[in-house]
Image (tube, rainbow, N blue to C red):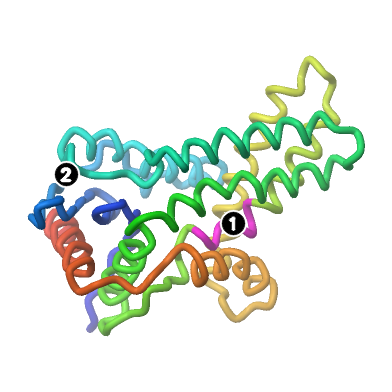
Amino acid sequence: MSEEKLRLGGMALANGVLVHGPTAWACAIRTEDGQLKVVARRKRLRASKVESPLLRGPVRLLDAMAIIPEIRRALPEAKLPFQRPAVIVAMIGSATVVKMMRGSRSVGPAAQELVGGVLSIAPAALALRGSDVAAYHGAEHISIGSYEQGKRATKEHNRCGSHLIGPLLATTAIGNTLAARAPAHMRTPARLGAQLFALAASTEIFGWMVRNPEKRLARALAKPGHELQHRLATAEPTPEQVEVAEAALAACLELEQE
């Protein structure tokens, strides 16, 4: 009987890779002097225990985000993709344009939300493309994919978070369009509710896409994320970068299997 594989996730850094499982995480980086450093910890928040469809998506996001402060404390040399000045400028710029669009009467609400959603992913695309992040993103996919498949995987992975883009754009546009029709005094909480709905719904849709890759709708929803992953977000890593990703994977699995 083949060994059951753990469901793993990950994130690329500018100088390393984070791998996380149901109960543990590990981060490996390559310092400027070429040293390989690895840190592994137990998770404080475990999203795998949450069964509610409404909460699964938001809690999984919190699960991943809660690790970042721990990485910063344990590995001060770690370079997060979103800390580059160009990415911060892009985030401010996209937020400003989205706010201006929502105040415009020349564009319909649905079109405003759809274009706003596209603009909101620009900083993430820039963060993944910059420096060595795209190569470490490819290394992350190769290490996790090889573990899951039992053979050398490619730099692209069908469970990459980039595939959430299609469902998230659609559900955000629908939710915010409906929220815009709420009375003025209720519009802010309505938008917050719409964001929760979009995240929860897109996570459930993404799960369906992973389970049904042959479906035409699943392929259509995955197309934007696949193109982003193929053209911008991943690059072929060097053997040294793959070594870093594999070190993070091994350390995470060691803790998970204890």
From the image, which quarter does the N terminus lie in?
bottom left
Q: Is residue 81 left or right of residue 69?
A: right
Residue, disc 1: 165
* Above or below, 185 relative to 191: above
The amino acid type found where label 2 is placed reads Arg
- Describe the element under mark 2 as helix, strand or loop: strand
Residue, disc 2: 41
**Residue occupying image coordinates x 44% and y 58%:** 129
Residues under labels 1 and 2: Cα distance? 29 Å
From the image, which quarter does the C terminus lie in?
bottom left
Q: Is residue 67 magenta?
A: no
- What span is colored magenta in the figure? 162-168
- Disc nearer the start of the sequence (1/2): 2
Question: Residue 206: horizontal and vertical position, in percent?
Answer: 56, 60
The amino acid type found where label 1 is placed reads Ile
**Residue occupying image coordinates x 70% and y 36%:** 98
Q: Quadrant of residue 181?
A: top right
As drawn, the residue found furthest toward the right would be 106
**Residue occupying image coordinates x 70% and y 30%:** 191
Circles 1 and 2 in contact, beta carbons < 8 Å: no
Q: Main secondary structure of the magenta part?
A: helix
* Above or below, 76 relative to 27: above
Q: Nearer the viewer, residue 101 or 223?
A: 101
Q: Quadrant of residue 12?
A: bottom left
Task: Please tell me how crowded label 2 is: few (under 14), some (14-19), or many (20+) other residues with Cα within 10 Å.
Answer: some
